Amino acid sequence: MKRIVVLTGAGISAESGIRTFRDSGGLWEEYDIMDVATFEAWEQNRDLVMEFYNQRRKQLYEVKPNEAHYALVDLEKDFDVRIITQNVDDLHERAGSSHVMHLHGELKKVRSTVDDSLVYDLDGWELKVGDHCEKGSQLRPHIVWFGEPVEMIPAAADLSSTADIYVIIGTSLNVYPAAGLVGYVRPGTPVYLIDPGEMSVGHIPGVRVIREKAGRGTRQLAEMLRSGKSG
Ligand code: APR
């Protein structure tokens, strides 16, 4: 079976009703990254950071996967599909994808602030001050904040280098090191990019752009790949 490695970003969850970050109306228009998505913010204004992630986690219980997520699940019938996502939602898992790697953490998980290896599934949407790990420390969102190391990058780079087909869906490729993963793809590997927006892709040799929203674009690509017309 050919291996398809898929790098996804916020755009794949947009049609599920989850805001992206840098589109108009995106999250970073309403919040300053430095106020809600850094360890310093957590130390200086824990309540605001807690509330930012509680609200995003609460929304997860109100949304569901869209046809783009399901199209990737369907591809598993004919391909070995591995997903590397920048998203912290659980929509890939809920759609049924078998292999999902979260580069930037997971909204539904929390972790100890004294021992990074202590990670827990959060029961419900609300993390509160006073919720402690087994070692008695305050639990924090299991999210990679700006300035924190992306521990999964070596594994994601290795996985990207094994792709027979590489697909990029719904990411502005603004944030490194995630945006650099395409550089690990073997020369000559077909690379597809699905995004309705205009974005510069000159740095991706031979990329084939499908200028569509994720749902329609991923379905189109899946049909192409299954019919053997490309890949
Ligand atoms: N279908 C597909 N793509 C879409 C759709 C859609 N319906 N709507 C928007 N997009 C595209 C936008 O054109 C843009 O290229 O999704 C991309 C969203 O880009 P960002 O908002 O920058 O999100 P992302 O690339 O995932 O951000 C990367 O930055 O803020 C951090 O950690 C956060 O993981 C996030 C990282």
Image: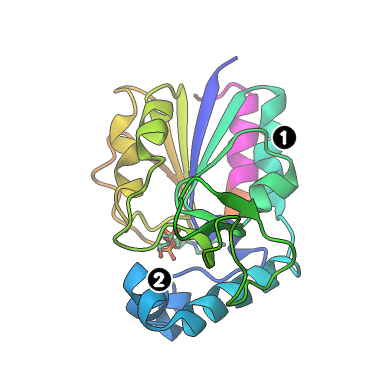
In depth, the one of 39 and 101 nearer the eye is: 39
Q: Is residue 8 left or right of residue 174?
A: right
The residue shown at (68%, 28%) is 76
Characterize the local packing of mark 2: few (<14), some (14-19) or many (20 or more) Cα atoms within 10 angstroms: some
In depth, the one of 49 and 31 nearer the eye is: 49
> Quick check: can you spot residue 94?
yes
- Whether the residue carrying mark 2 lies under 8 Å from ligand 1 is answered with yes
Kind of residue sitting beneath label 1 = Asp
Q: Main secondary structure of the magenta part?
A: helix
Tell me which corner region of the image, top left, top right, bottom left or bottom right, holds residue 16: bottom right
Q: Magenta residues, as a range?
A: 218-229
Mark 2, residue position: 37
What is the residue that sits farthest to the top in this orientation?
1
Q: Is residue 106 magenta?
A: no
Residue 59 in percent (x, y) is at 68, 72
Q: SS at mark 2?
A: loop
Tell me which corner region of the image, top left, top right, bottom left or bottom right, holds residue 154: top left
Q: Is residue 109 left or right of residue 29?
A: right
Kind of residue sitting beneath label 2 = Ala
Q: Quadrant of the N terminus?
A: top right
- Considering only vertical position in the picture, is 94 above or below 89? above
In depth, the one of 195 and 66 nearer the eye is: 66
The residue shown at (42%, 77%) is 36
Mark 1, residue position: 74
